[in-house]
């Protein structure tokens, strides 16, 4: 009986000491974009609860599963993977540790101990596309994506729809940075792609490309054009030359997961306040009252269902 009692005390102590863990993708928590937003969610949880959390920033693909497994072996709970490239590692480790809870952002892992967070990026991209078309003086707007995957095509599809909704004859020029995860961390390549688009007459460029987008935004500023940021509010990186930023609040997913994983699929969009455009002191002069009114109307119509935005990932096509 004494042994059983001691064992129960040890289990209780382990449960109390269990800490959530977060695994950041390439680019890390200081990417001023996707990872930073997730980091802010973890930090907010820490401030609200007064409890610590574990973290790891991967440097190469092999570390994804290594990190998840190491945290699981330490009893971390839950374990949250930031970004779709971590889906396979989360799936593998979640199967091996069925009593622990896991979460993944931007991919679906259909296991009973995993919460999968996905976003309706096409809704928010529609709004920034609308703004790009209204702000363009040349009638040509650009898009630079990171890794060429359906998720990024989803951004592009929404952007195209919003631009043409505001200005049917607008021309949308697009490019993807690459086909491997390295496409998210190449600012120099982002700058090259932006310059190529500007040479074609593009005067507003939306960068949905992680830290690669920082090169896009710098090139737009240097070339006297406008850019659009993504994931975090990037308006302040180049005040006066960033038209807006599409905020994708990965912080909400992290905060929810840290507070208690709810296995299954969780979809977040405009209605949930998980996506929106950023308007602040850095871009206020670029956003006219008429532009803001059109954005507000489109947002309301999307939320109500009056305005339908095509989701590229639903049928692998933008139609």
Image: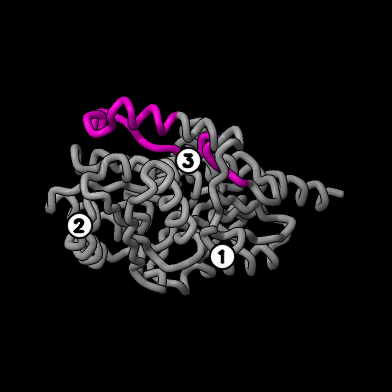
Q: Are marks 2 and 3 in contact (CB under 8 Å)?
A: no
* 36 vs 174, nearest the viewer: 174
Label 3 sits on a secondary structure element that is strand
Residue at (55%, 54%) from the top-left corner?
Answer: 311
Residue position marked by numbered label 3 in the rendering: 275
Q: What element carries label 1?
A: loop
The residue at the point 54 percent across, 47 percent down is: 309
Q: In which quarter of the image is residue 304?
A: top right
Q: Residue 310, image x and y in percent?
A: 55, 52
Left or right: 86, with 228 as reference point:
right
The mark closer to the camera, 3 or 1, is 1
For discs 2 and 3, the disc positioned in front in the rendered view: 2
Q: How crowded is mark 2: few (under 14 residues within 10 Å), some or many (20 or more)?
A: some
Q: Can residue 317 be seen in this view?
A: yes
**Quadrant assignment, res 91:** bottom right
Looking at the image, is mark 1 or mark 2 nearer the viewer?
2
Is 189 included in the stretch rendered in magenta?
Answer: no
Residue bearing the label numbered 1: 316
- Crowdedness near tag 1: few (<14), some (14–19) or many (≥20) residues, C-alpha within 10 Å: few
Give left or right: position of 100 versus 161: right
What is the number of the mark on residue 201? Answer: 2
For the residues labelled 2 and 3, the Cα–Cα distance comes to 29 Å
Tags 3 and 1 in contact by the CB under 8 Å rule?
Answer: no
Residue 169's place in the image compared with 25, above or below, is above
- Specify which label sits upstream in the sequence, 3 or 1: 3
In magenta, the rendered stretch is: 267-296
In what element is the residue under mark 2? loop
- Residue 291 % position (x, y): 33, 32
Residue at 46% from the left image edge and 43% from the top image edge: 124
């Amino acid at each position: 009986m004494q042994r059983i009692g001691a064992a129960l005390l040890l289990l209780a102590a382990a449960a109390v000491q269990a800490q959530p863990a977060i695994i950041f993708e390439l680019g890390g928590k200081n990417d001023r974009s996707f990872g930073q937003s997730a980091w802010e969610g973890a930090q907010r949880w820490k401030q609200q609860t007064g409890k610590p959390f574990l973290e790891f920033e991967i440097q190469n693909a092999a570390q994804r599963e290594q990190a998840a497994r190491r945290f699981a072996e330490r009893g971390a709970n839950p374990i949250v993977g930031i970004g779709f490239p971590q889906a396979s590692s989360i799936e593998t480790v979640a199967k091996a540790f069925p009593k622990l809870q896991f979460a993944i952002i931007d991919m679906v892992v259909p296991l009973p101990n995993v919460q999968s967070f996905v976003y309706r990026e096409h809704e928010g991209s529609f709004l920034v596309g609308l703004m790009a078309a209204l702000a363009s003086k040349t009638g040509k707007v650009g898009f630079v994506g990171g890794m060429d995957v359906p998720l990024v095509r989803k951004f592009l599809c929404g952007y195209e729809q919003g631009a043409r909704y505001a200005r049917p004859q607008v021309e949308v020029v697009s490019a993807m940075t690459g086909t491997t995860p390295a496409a998210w961390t190449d600012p120099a390549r982002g700058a090259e792609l932006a310059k190529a688009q500007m040479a074609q007459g593009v005067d507003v460029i939306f960068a949905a490309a992680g830290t690669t987008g920082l090169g896009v935004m710098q090139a737009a500023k240097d070339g006297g054009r406008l850019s659009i940021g993504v994931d975090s509010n990037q308006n302040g990186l180049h005040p006066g030359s960033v038209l807006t930023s599409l905020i994708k609040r990965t912080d909400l997913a992290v905060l929810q997961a840290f507070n208690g994983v709810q296995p299954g699929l969780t979809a977040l969009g405009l209605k949930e306040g998980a996506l929106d455009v950023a308007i602040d002191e850095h871009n206020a002069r670029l956003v006219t009252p008429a532009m803001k009114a059109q954005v507000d109307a489109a947002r309301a119509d999307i939320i109500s269902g009056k305005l339908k935005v095509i989701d590229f990932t639903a049928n692998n096509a933008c139609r």
